[in-house]
Image: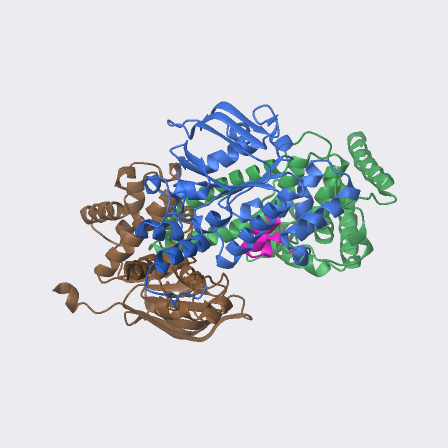
Amino acid sequence: MKRAVKALNRISVQQLAFSYNGRDMVFENFSAEFSGGPTAIIGQNGAGKTTLVKLIKGLLKPDKGRILINGIPAGSMTVRDLAKTVGLVFQNPNDQIFKPSVLEEVTFGPNIIGFSGEKAERSAKEALEMLGISHLKHENPYDLNLSQRKLVSIASILSMDPDILIFDEPTMGQDYEGREIIKRTIRHLRERGKLVLAILHDMDFVAENFDRAVVLHEGKIIADGHPREVFAREEIVAQAGLELPNAVKLGKRLGLKDIFLTKNELIRYLKERASDR
Amino acid sequence: MNGMGLYEERNTWVHRSDPVTKLFYGITVSAIPYILPYMGVAAFFLCLNILLLVLAKVFKKILPILFLSFFLMLSIVIVHGIFHPDNRTPLFSAGGIHFYREGLSLAALLIIRLLNMICGFGVVVLTTKPDLLVNGLVQTGLSPRIGYVIHSVFRIIPQMAATVNKIKDAQRARGVETEGNLLTRAKALFPLLVPVIMSSLIATKERTMALELRGFGSKGKRTFLKEYEEGRYSRQARWFFLLLLFGSAVWRVLI
Amino acid sequence: MKKIVVEGLKYRYPGAERLALDDVSFEVNAGELIGIIGKNGSGKSTLCYALTGLVPHFFRGAYGGRVLLDGLEVKTSTVAEISRKAGLVFDNPFTQISAAKETVFEEIAFGLENAGVPREEMAERIEWSMKLLGIEGIREKNPFELSGGQMQRVAIAGMLVMKPDILILDEPTSQLDPQGTEEVFQVIRNLAKEGMTILVAEHKVEKLAEYADKLLLLHDGKCAAFDAPKRVFSMENAESYGVELPLAAQIAKELDLRDEAGLYPAAPDELLALLKGRLQGAAGTDERFTE
């Protein structure tokens, strides 16, 4: 019952303007609201996805406009407070991992933001469990392969139990098993009422796991809605330099008129047709 | 691309000169004032270097570097002017503290020598494209591996700086404070240092693999896309500089 | 003569407990496009290193068995010698740029310089290589200022210019956006058409399934299967190896659609044909299938 009373997590980007060098504007009067189900941010490299995420996380300061995290301006929060509320998992785990064991790495974050020793350890173990890497807890992260290290870096943010989680290319370099683990994690986070944002190039993953897809192109949103609607707009997809999810593509190759977002939809439909005898 | 912003494309005779000869020049004019510690010698070479910098139209670029060493120079003046053991003759006083002639003239020499060295190497670095210099050195006989290390330093340092920023962002995102008092910064040291070192090691390993796959480790004869042409008088010039160096050493020993 | 022969290849990294490659044997004919698949840690990268001599010469470690490229034995040749037979491209476009050159054109020349190729020949080979990769337009650009897809193509060009007739790619698109990925796969398809022998380690089975002649499925360092894609995907326990089947095969499996040989289709067109066949049995023609 406590969960139902808790306010919905929300990020509000208001009239954002930003440039790195003072001349080329990455964003000009950019506004967006993020809340509710898992949202995917997609678009070509250079469209502004990572910049947006860094602005939300307070790593960059906007030239104009503001960003509200659950109603509080991001600019007014300290690094520590922001870390308690918004967790950002970076693309390259090597940019972050520094402890000699997985468990220590995953306990570091909770300790920094003020969890008690016992709570930090418990939270870390839960995170490791969620990502299926409990058996690796005493390993040195740099002895693991890159995709395992990626799971460690995800766990190290998850253990901080923030209300909002942002992932930058979580499925990059992952095999089937790794993707399933991340899929499960996002579902788990959604069930617990967390707001999940993810930058992704894997369109299949977007189609199967996200309620909303925001397409960025040159600092502007050119499409925003349920993946089913977004992927139905082929010109937008092409303009943004994206590909259609494989199920959608296959559906088209088979000459079907409807959009089949996931393989399960396609399978279900074809099974029905095949049994129409 | 341009030696961390130091080199800029320009078309003066200094720029067009043989890079390896320029290096000989830079080393010679920086070393001689140390071999022959006379004010006149140092001042002469300093004026020569300044003249070259002006002719090469890069004088403005050396000024920021000279200003950077201002505090060093100031401390030299203070330390030697006040405290040198040979001090006897006071030259002037400021706020009750005496500055002596002996110390100050030594300080002057040290400063002129320092300025001279900066300007001398400035002539080399500001007018020479890094890859041409390395190319020239390698074709003159420097080991290609060392040449690669020298050249890649110009490219890799900016990359490493970018990596350090990424790591700083990642740790800040976890709640690690990186700005603030000394204690705060000290606590941030490990979370920043370890990933920087590991990233560099990993990148170096991958880069080395890629280089090996392109035959970098080959012991055979190498060829070069960009032909390094020695300047017309390069040989003579380089012998001249070597002779100057040798000559000044001899002079020093004999006098 | 077979282009690539691998016999009983075994390898253990220094200080490791288990074998990274455990008695792997297979042969590749000239001009074939082979996909190397398997879950992370199954040995895909190690195999790529073993085919180009980085294993054992760069990594040291315990090595057994033989790898022959056009008769040249990897164990007794240097990496530089092997690089003239087989080129290798990695997943990180960044670390493959030598950082010793200012323009793309010069960057591609790097391997030629190391190999002692005469200057007069260089320009011609570099032009040929750039044309093959579609990068003539960026010849003057600084390699570090390119997009990921462009950087990878420069890396491939830098390998091809040494005129190997084998090209090995280790997850070349894993760090690229969809456009970059498509650019690289396009290059692979073109090179295959030109008759190059290509091995690609990849997770993106969908793209491989249509074009690969054979798939090499690795599991725990062992070769679990080496066969045409359709056969590999039709294996009883295919999924237990941690690989995802291409969509067409997954659908066919769910609908129990097999071809005359009893295999699932690997590519959409085959699936379409089978589906039409199945649905033809239904009442009349189906207006939804427009092809």
Colour displayed for chain B in the image of the structure: green
**Of residues C198 and A220, the one drawn nearer to the viewer in this rendering:** C198
User: Is C127 situated above or below B202?
Assistant: below
**Of residues A112 and C231, the one drawn nearer to the viewer in this rendering:** C231
Q: Position of residue A93 (x, y in %)?
A: 40, 48
Name the residue rendered at 83%, 35% in the picture: B243
Main SS, magenta residues: helix
**How many numbered discs sit on the rendered protein?**
0
- Mark yes or no: residue C271 visible: yes
Colour displayed for chain C in the image of the structure: blue
Residue B2 falls left or right of residue A125: right
Q: Position of residue A16 (x, y in %)?
A: 42, 74
User: Is B243 situated above or below A20?
Assistant: above
- Mark yes or no: residue A98 visible: no
Magenta highlight range: C141-155
Name the residue rendered at 41%, 40% in the picture: C232
The chain assigned the colour brown in the figure is A
Residue C213 magenta-drawn?
A: no
